Amino acid sequence: MRRLMCFCVVVFVMPGSASAQKPPLLPDQDLAALAQELSGETAKRNLEGLARFHRQRGSQGFHSAAELVAERARAYGLSDVAILQFPADGKIFYGTQRSRPGWDAEFAELWEMREEGKAANAAHDAAPGGRTGGGPWKPVLQMASYEAEPVVLAEDSESADLTADLVDVGDGTKEGHYAGQDVKGKIVLAGAQPGAVQDLAVGKFGAAGIVSYAQNQKTAWWGEDENLIRWGHLETFSPNKTFGFMVSLKTARALRERLAQGEQIRLHATVKAGQHPGNYEVVTATIPGADPKLNEEIAFSCHLDHQRPGANDNASGCVTILEVARALQRLIHDGKLARPARTIRFIWPPEMEGTVTLLNAKPEFRRRIKAAVHMDMVGGGPATKAVLHITRGPMSLPSFVHDVAWAFGEFVNEQSYKFAATGGAEYPLVAPQGGKEPLQAQYSAYTMGSDHDVYQDSSFKIPAIYLNDWPDRYIHTNFDTAANIDPTKLKRAAFIGAASGYVLANAGRQEWLETTILQGHELRKSQSEPLLWNLSNDEACNFYRENLAYEKAVAESTQPFTGESSIRVVNDAAVRCEGPPRKSTGQPLVYKRRPEPLGPLAVFGYDYFADHAKTAGLETPKLLGYEGLWGSGEEFAYEVLNFADGKRSAQQIRDAVSAEYGPIPLDFVVEYLRALEKIGLVEQAR
């Protein structure tokens, strides 16, 4: 899972609240059946299997993981089990995703060399070329081994076999970092990701390779454990092919100190790896619906690719939807649950790029899927410091499905807290080998960073429930292991997802929909109040108006499921502001998105906007670097494009995204829309 910085307000719903102890969405017998059948231990056993594989896109490790998932799905009795394959060669496009060629590695080692007869850590004597004598150099210390820990080799590394001196270039991302340094033919030691360094270090200054000590995403625990090795990436499409090794902060600090003292450090790197034409592989399976005339589906998704072990990110999401599939299939087969009206589909793709590919290559999928339940990191135990979020969709796609998910999340919060506090609860949802802590899931505003961005993009408009852990102190490191995964957490995430998906697969004209939406409205209203503290009166009025429109649209979103909209919406925002909404001056500037290409612009390993803007000679729009009160550039850009529907003016789009992420200048929005027009993504509506 990618992480973007975003301000989100959350509310803990604790015992004693006015909410019901049982959600009205399912009968007691259905809740009990799910609670009894779902197994955190079964999910964790499958996770331990997946965590054995280095699951890079298009690799043998990914294929082995896909085969494991498909084998389990068949064993559980699911229907239509298949591993779909889509060619990926770096040239084929699937909507906005330029297919990335497969990448495999066979072998990689990094050794420190020492001149024979020379004592360890002796300072070199400034002889020409850094040599201290004429003796042969021998390997003395293995610094990295792909066989032992695949995370040490940066993804998209190319083959190499060389011995070269190490040069410290600091962060390595600016030309000034190389001032006075001779790095040609040498290996650079850099604090940034290899992909952020390679075009300067290799392309401009002629370095032979990279050793990176890039750190993890910042949390409260950032930098505390200097033994963590961060997952590294080179740029897939960079012309400056090279290799990158990843080392811990502890290792890097020792190397930097020795280099600062003038010591010559010579390394030998051996890499057998590289890109190759391959396939995106997507595992899919179904539980067929009961109504053959209702050609609709509810999808469960995750992302199967990641470095080894990648336990929470994202073996946890993959095995949790697999456990949902197993439990629902068994309960339906045994007659303990009625077969749902809609088909339930399960999807295991590479992150984001696989989902964009699937929805472009299989248009029948995107037409049938009415909603998705996406899980990306849902099993983090106490050591990870993880908190489970039930994340709403963007304001550009209002939907009641998020209220359904929160109804079950709130229920699990209440039941698990009651059990932890008193030792007794009707639905403790505790796994025998798991913890007993309360869940304390949070209902969060939209944050980007996983496949839910793809589903909810304006190309597809599929509302997605997003279950995700954050923070996680071990994300993207060698310490993201199965030992840190809690079976109880897996069971609870599976319960929230299974109950939500089953309800949506049966959703019709049930009275509970209205109550659920109203409860969601009240919670969103309470969460929004702190956001107003830093807004002017005009912006506060805009905030109220946009949120009222959003709540009305949430009520109307039931129509595709029920045939009618929920009509009861609490309308208290209109009285907060005096005067009409602001009006655009002059002729309104209205844009609409073109039918092609489909998908979000910042996908995975490829940036459609950046690539096409460079070709068109465009400067980077100011919107992309903008930091709002509680949103950042990529989020603003995502929503500006989503709101470009041929109905809203640029001013109205500006008002909508300002209500979602904080005020933004109108000219930033207009500049970005004009840039989108120049690269052929939007056109002016006539």
Image (spheres, grey):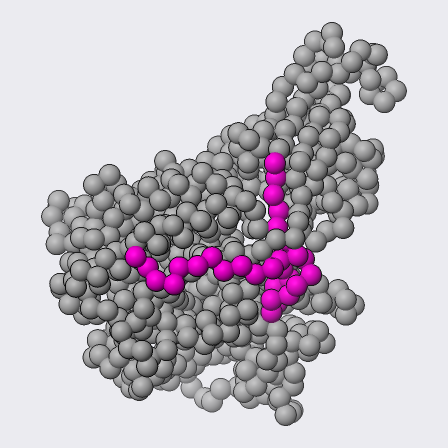
Q: Give the residue drawn at x 76%, y 50%.
A: 239
Give the magenta-colored segment's residue range: 77-106
Residue 364 colored magenta? no
**Is 403 placed above or below 167 here?**
below
Q: Nearer the viewer, residue 508 or 395?
A: 508
Q: Give the residue drawn at x 56%, y 47%.
A: 59
Residue 88 colored magenta? yes
Is residue 555 shown to the viewer in this render?
A: no
Q: Is residue 105 found left or right of 449 in the rendered image?
A: right
Q: Is residue 271 found left or right of 397 in the rendered image?
A: right
Q: Nearer the viewer, residue 342 or 638?
A: 342
Q: Main secondary structure of the magenta part?
A: strand
Q: Give the residue drawn at x 38%, y 50%.
A: 71
Figure quadrant of residue 597:
bottom right
Residue 11 lies, in percent from the top left, at 32, 60
Number of labelled discs? 0
